[in-house]
Image (cartoon, rainbow, N blue to C red):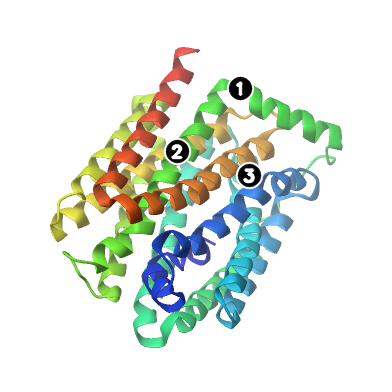
Amino acid sequence: MFALLYAPQPLLPQLAAEYSLDPGTASLAVGVATGGLAVGVLPIASLSEVAGRRPVILVSVLAAAVLGLLLPLAPNYPVLLAMRAVQGLAVAGFAGVAAAYLAERLGKAGVAAAVGAMIAGNTVGGMVGRVLSGVVADHLGLSGALLTVGAFGLACALLTVFTLPPIQYAAAPAPGDVLRGLGAAVRRPVLLGQYAVAMLAMGSFVALYNAAGFRLTEPPLALPPAIASLVFLAYAMGTVSSSFAGRLIDRFGRVPAVVGALAVTVAGAGLTIVDSLPLVAIGFAVLTGGFFAAHAVANGTVAAESPPGARGQAAGLYTLAYYLGSSVGGTVGTVVFDHAGWTWLIGTVTVWLTLSALAAVAVRSRH
């Protein structure tokens, strides 16, 4: 799912050149997909309360994969954007439901480690999709790159169909119960704090990676596009850090863990200001590790602290905030880079990440 969602990200400079776009407009290839996800996640998560988590996940992964295979057929950029928006809507069925599925499958005691492992899987998929599309584009062009990632997504979707275990449910809740669960998911301060972390941190993260291709392929670094796409190998750090989220919580507590992870993200972003390829590479590795640790802690907190009967709604609200941040923050950050440069982008995301840390601390001060 995350390979499909972010496959166009390393292709943004090529998209800009092919369709005569500025970086902000090119970044809409990512922004409209995450925007579609944000729009769809809450109603689909609520639907999963009635229809069941597993059916929603299966329809989601299959629809997103089929759309991935159809993307190369788009005749122009507006049609490509429309297809990406629908694909993001399809991804919402997985992104908004998966954490709740794990919570119901494993219980509160095991969900933190499970969500961390799932996010580690997300980082692997995101890394594979980005690197694969960036490298293949040099040989097969934009359409070949998108088709390759679409085929990879379909293989993963079929694996999910044949292996995802069912869950035995009690009677489906009434619509009124679903609405009451939504109300409970917005009344708990601890959950509101995690939604703020999701929105601000994800907006920062996507903004940096949207602009990364332009920074790396333009002077003074001036890397070939296929080499520049290797920056997404930094996602391996996110795979490692997110898988340790449960241990961080056990050792330091939820709030210190998420604040520390956000501080690491800021430090990594700062390293990328220097026009030195080794420092830029190290900076992306550090900020990626920090971001995914923060995301795993915040997402696990939502899964563990959601009131009974509101897991799907709370997971949906978290994912809504996460991808609203991706869509809006990612696009705004790319516009900042286009008009003011990389240093101003780093300053902007530092403010956003600081605000997200303050939100987590403010929640703690009320408990």
Residue 78 found in image quarter: bottom right
The correct choice, above or below, for 285 with respect to 11 in the image is above
Residue highlighted by disc 1: 188
The count of marks equals 3
What is the CA distance from the residue labelled 1 to the residue labelled 2?
19 Å
Task: Give the label, 3 or 2, closer to the camera.
Answer: 2
- Element at label 2: helix
Upstream in sequence: badge 1 or badge 2: 1
Task: Give the label, 1 or 2, closer to the camera.
Answer: 2
**Residue 244 position in % (x across, y down):** 36, 42
Residue highlighted by disc 3: 105
Q: Indicate the quadrant containing the N terminus: top left, top right, bottom left or bottom right.
A: bottom right
Between 72 and 100, the residue placed more toward the observer is 72
Q: Name the kind of residue labelled 2 in the image.
A: Leu
The correct choice, above or below, for 254 with respect to 97 in the image is above
**Residue 346 position in % (x across, y down):** 28, 44
Between 225 and 313, the residue placed more toward the observer is 225
**Residue drawn at point x = 56 percent, y = 58 percent:** 32
Between 271 and 319, the residue placed more toward the observer is 271
Residue highlighted by disc 2: 200
Residue 16 numbered tag: none
**Residue drawn at point x = 23 percent, y = 39 percent:** 267
**Left-right relation of 279 to 317:** left
